[in-house]
Amino acid sequence: MTVKSPALIAPVVVPKAADILANRLRDLIVKGQITPGSFLPTERDLVTESGLSRTSVRDALRILESEGLITTKVGRTGGSMVTLPGRASVARSVELFVRTHGIRLESLLECRVAVEPTLARLAAKRRTPEQLAEMEELHEQFVASVDDVAHYKNVNLDWHLAIARASGNEPLMALMEAISTPIRDAMDYQHVTTPELRVIAVKAHTVILKAIREQDEDAAFQRMDRHVAGYRDIATGAAPMPPAAKNTTAKIRIIDI
Ligand SMILES: [Zn+2]
C-alpha cells in the first residue's frame, strides 16, 4: 500500500550548476587557497575541469564579480583576478538592500543607536593623534558651517565617519558607512528643524570630541548614545522638537548623521 505522506518529502531544490561552481571558487578564495592578485583558471580551463557548460562557468564568474571577489580583465593577458571586497562593497550591498527593501528611516536610526556609541568608545580607546586631529579639524568646520546647510551636512557625516574609522573595528565601520548614506539621503522624510536643534548638535559633538580627546571611553559611549538616541527620537516624532526661536523665520534642515 502506498502511504501518502507529503510531510515526509520536502520539496527538493536543485542548485544551479553556476551556484555550485561559484561556491567552490568562493571557498578557495575565502580560505586563502587562491590569493588576492592571482588569477583564477581561464574560462576554458574551468569548463574542462568542472565539466560544466561555458554558460554556467560564465554565470559563476559573474556571481563572484558581483560579490567583489574577482575583477575580470579583458584582453590576452586578461582573466579573473582575485580581489578582496573592501568596506565599500559591504556598504554598497547594504545600501542596495536598504533601498530595494524599503527599509524605514526609523530602523536605520535604531541601527545607528546600536552601533555609534560603541564606535565612539573604541575611538576613545584607539584613536591616533592623526585621527584626533582630523576629528578636531572637521569639528571646527562643523561649528563654522552654520549658514551653509549643504556643507554642514557633509562635514557632519565626515565627522561621524572619522570616529567610525578611528574605532579600528572593520565590521562596525563597514556597517556605519553602509547606513550613513541612506540616512543622509532620507532627508526628505525628516522634519524641518530649528536652529536650536543645530546648536544642540554642536554642543553634543563638542562633548563627544572632548571624551575622545581625553580617551574617556565611558563618557564617549554615553555622550554618543545620548546624541544619536536623542536624534532618533526627534526624527521619528517620539520626542518633541525644541521650541523655535523667536525672531527667526529661518527654517533649517538638520541632517545629523
Ligand atoms: Zn552628530
Image: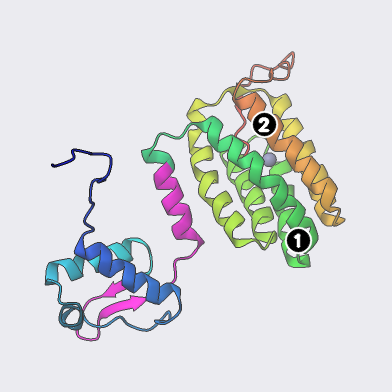
Q: Residue flagged by tag 2: what amino acid is it?
A: Tyr
Left or right of 256, for residue 205: right
Is any part of residue 43 visible from this angle?
yes
Q: Quadrant of residue 110?
A: top right
- Is the residue at mark 2 in contact range of ligand 1, meaning its CB lies under 8 Å from it? yes
Q: Quadrant of the N terminus?
A: top left
In the image, residue 188 sits, relative to residue 33, either above or below, namely above
Q: Is residue 74 magenta?
A: yes
Write down which quadrant ligand 1 falls in.
top right
Residues at marks 1 and 2, CA–CA distance in whole angstroms:
26 Å
What residue does disc 2 label?
A: 231
- Residue 83, visible in the rendered structure: no
Tell me where residue 115 appears, x and y as whole percent: 65, 46
Give SS at disc 2. Answer: helix
Residue that label 1 marks: 133
Q: Earlier in the sequence, mark 1 or mark 2?
A: 1
The answer to whether 36 is drawn above or below residue 141 in the figure is below
Q: Is residue 47 above or below residue 154?
A: below
Q: Secondary structure at mark 1?
A: helix
